[in-house]
Image (tube, rainbow, N blue to C red):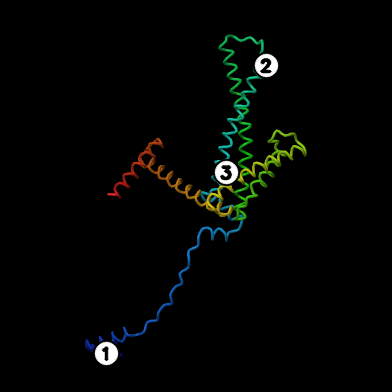
Amino acid sequence: MTGWWEWLGWKPSTSQQQQQIVIIEEQPRIAEPPQPILPSRTSEEVREELSGWDRIKQIYETNSMEKDAVVRVVRMSFFGGFLVGGATGYAQARHAYETNNVGRKYLSPSDAVKRKIDYAIVRFAKGGFGIGIKCAIISGSIVLLTTHAAAYRNKFSSWYFPAISGATACVLHSVGGIFTFPLGLLGSMKAIGLGISSGLTLSAVVHLYAMSIDKPVDESYRLFKRDYEKELKASSEWDSRVAELMERENIRWRQSAVKKLKQLDAEKLAHLDD
C-alpha cells in the first residue's frame, strides 16, 4: 500500500518511517548454529591412514630421512671401501711387481720408478673401485630395505637389521659373488652369519640410542626420523636461499654467497635487538 500512496504523491511522515524501521529491526534473527572446531591432525596420524605403498611413494615425494640416509650410507661406504681396497691392493701390487720384474732392464732409474708408480696407481684404483662398489651395494641395500620395510609397516623393530642383513648377504653372495667365500652351502652359511652379526651390531646401536633417551625402539626411531627431517628441511631452505642470493646478485662462488648471507642474517638480528 505504501508504494501506491507514494506513486500518488503522498509520503509518510518521519514518525511512521521510524516505526517501520523499528518494526523491521525488531524482527527476530535466527541464530546460526556454531560450527564445530575440528582438531588438526598431526603428520603421524595422516601417515597411519595411508597404505603401505602410499607411504613408500611418500618417501620419494618429499625430503625424507630414508632417501637421504641411503644416499649418505652408499657414499660413505664407497669411499671407505675405496681407501681400504686401494691400500690392500697397493701392498699386493708392490710385492707382485717386485717379484715379476726381477732382472728387467729399464732405460733409466727414473723410468723404473715411473713404471712402478704407474703400476701401483692402476692397482690401487682397480682394488679401490672393486671393494668400494661391493661395500656400497651391501650397505646401501641393507639400509634401503630396512628403512622401506619400516615405512611400509609403519613400525620399526630391532630384528629388521639382522634379518634383512642376513638375507641380503646370502643373496649377494649366491648371485653376485660379492664375498670371497667359496660358493656352495658352506659359503652361503658364512655369508648369512656375517650378515646377521653385522645386523646385530646395528641393532645394538639402535637399542643404545633408545636407552639413552629412555624410549621404546619404535618411538625412538620416529623421534629420530622427525628430527632428521627437520634438519633436512632447514638445510634445503638454506640451500635455496643461497642459490637465490647467487642468482640475484650474480655471485659465482657458493662460499662467497654463504658468507654474505650469514652477514645479512647477523645484521638483521642486530637490528631486531636494537
Q: Rounded to the nearest whole Å, what is the CA distance between mark 3 and mark 1?
A: 87 Å
Residue of label 1: 5
Residue of label 3: 70
> In the figure, 104 relative to 55: above or below?
above
Label 1: few (<14), some or many (≥20) within 10 Å?
few
Residue 115's disc number: none
Dot 1: element: helix
The image shows residue 248 at horizontal and vertical percentages of: 36, 42
> In the figure, 80 relative to 227: above or below?
above
Label 2: few (<14), some or many (≥20) within 10 Å?
few
Total marks in image = 3
The image shows residue 237 at horizontal and vertical percentages of: 43, 47
Q: Rounded to the nearest whole Å, what is the CA distance between mark 2 and mark 3?
A: 42 Å
Question: What residue type is disc 1 on?
Answer: Trp
Q: Residue at x 61, y 10 (%)?
A: 106
Question: What residue type is disc 3 on?
Answer: Val
Residue 67 visible here: yes
Dot 3: element: helix
Residue 9 visible here: no
Residue of label 2: 99
Label 3: few (<14), some or many (≥20) within 10 Å?
some
Q: Quadrant of the N terminus?
A: bottom left
